[in-house]
């Protein structure tokens, strides 16, 4: 039991550090919208910032919408953490605990962006990732063009604790063959994601693939 706990703690902390190091590296070394091949031309780094959930989905532009999303994430993380602890106390299989841990890591990793990145990095109202209509929050964007400074008021997202964007960077640059109807020439998987998203996807995938092993009693009861 203690060995399992040690492995899980090391896994969670290590993967959280990896997630944050990647995001910090992107924030420090890339400019908005910058792309760079990672493995050939089919796997690239493509720096964007996501103000909401997966694929840029938001609950609206008000400050309460963003806070509601962050609070929902916090509740979900506590729920996943509690479930992980109860399954550990039941001495569940190690691979099942790892799958739950990966989901926990991904959810917490993305929450950290929203919680602290507006304090770690200066807020730039000229950065188009910070533009958001409907907030009523206007700030001056000062830009230098040919040695002259120009100022304009822009409507930006609310920023601060629990209000930050999530940093995404990985993208598969693979297209369907043009001969295929409807999807020909389009990207197979156009979403841009991060290490935390990969952890969630891997954890959920493991549970779906091995659900008969993880939930044998539930399956028998439902059959009856």
Image (cartoon, grey):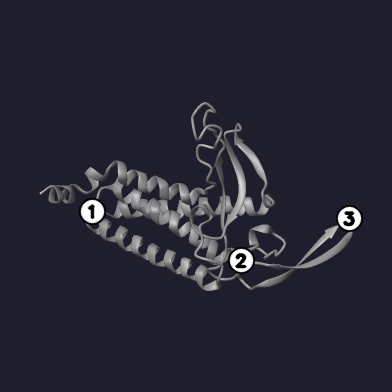
Left or right of 203? Residue 152 is right
Mark nearer the viewer, 1 or 3: 3
Q: Quadrant of the N terminus?
A: bottom left
Q: Which residue is mark 1?
A: 91
Tell me the mark number nearer the camera, choosing from 2 and 1: 2
Q: Secondary structure at mark 3?
A: loop
Give the mark nearer the N terminus: 3 vs 2.
2
Q: Earlier in the sequence, mark 1 or mark 3?
A: 1
Residue 89 location in percent, x, y? 24, 59
Q: Which residue is mark 3?
A: 146
**Residue in view at x 62 percent, y 64 percent:** 132
Q: Nearer the viewer, residue 141 or 13?
A: 141
CA–CA distance in space, label 1 to label 3? 66 Å
Q: Give the quadrant of residue 165.
A: bottom right
- As rendered, which of 154 and 216 lies closer to the eye? 154
Count residues near mark 3 (Cα–Cα under 10 Å), then give few for <14, some for 14-19, many for 20+: few
Q: CA distance from mark 2 to mark 1?
A: 40 Å
Residue 118: mark in rendering: 2
Picture coordinates of residue 187, whole percent (x, y): 54, 37
Q: Is residue 93 left or right of residue 174?
A: left
Location of residue 149 with respect to 54 vertically, above or below = below
Q: Nearer the viewer, residue 160 or 19?
A: 160
Q: Is residue 82 above or below residue 221?
A: below
Of tags 3 and 2, the one toward the viewer is 3
Residue 166, numbered label: none
């Amino acid at each position: 039991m203690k060995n399992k706990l040690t492995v899980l703690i090391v896994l969670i902390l290590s993967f959280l550090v990896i997630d944050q190091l990647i995001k910090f590296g992107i924030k420090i070394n890339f400019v908005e919208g910058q792309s760079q091949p990672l493995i050939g031309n089919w796997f690239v780094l493509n720096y964007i910032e996501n103000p909401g959930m997966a694929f840029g989905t938001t609950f609206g532009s008000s400050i309460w919408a963003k806070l509601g999303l962050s609070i929902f994430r916090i509740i979900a993380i506590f729920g996943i953490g509690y479930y992980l602890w109860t399954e550990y106390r039941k001495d569940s299989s190690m691979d099942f605990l790892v799958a739950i841990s990966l989901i926990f890591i991904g959810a917490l990793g993305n929450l950290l962006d929203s919680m602290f990145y507006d304090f770690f990095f200066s807020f730039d109202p000229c950065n188009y990732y910070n533009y958001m209509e409907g907030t009523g929050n206007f700030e001056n964007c000062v830009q230098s063009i040919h040695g002259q400074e120009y100022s304009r008021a822009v409507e930006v997202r609310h920023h601060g604790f629990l209000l930050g964007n999530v940093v995404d960077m990985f993208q598969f640059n693979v297209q369907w063959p043009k001969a295929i109807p409807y999807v020909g020439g389009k990207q197979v998987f156009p979403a841009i994601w991060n290490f935390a998203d990969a952890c969630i996807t891997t954890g959920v995938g493991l549970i779906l693939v091995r659900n008969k092993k993880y939930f044998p009693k539930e399956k028998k009861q439902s059959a009856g």
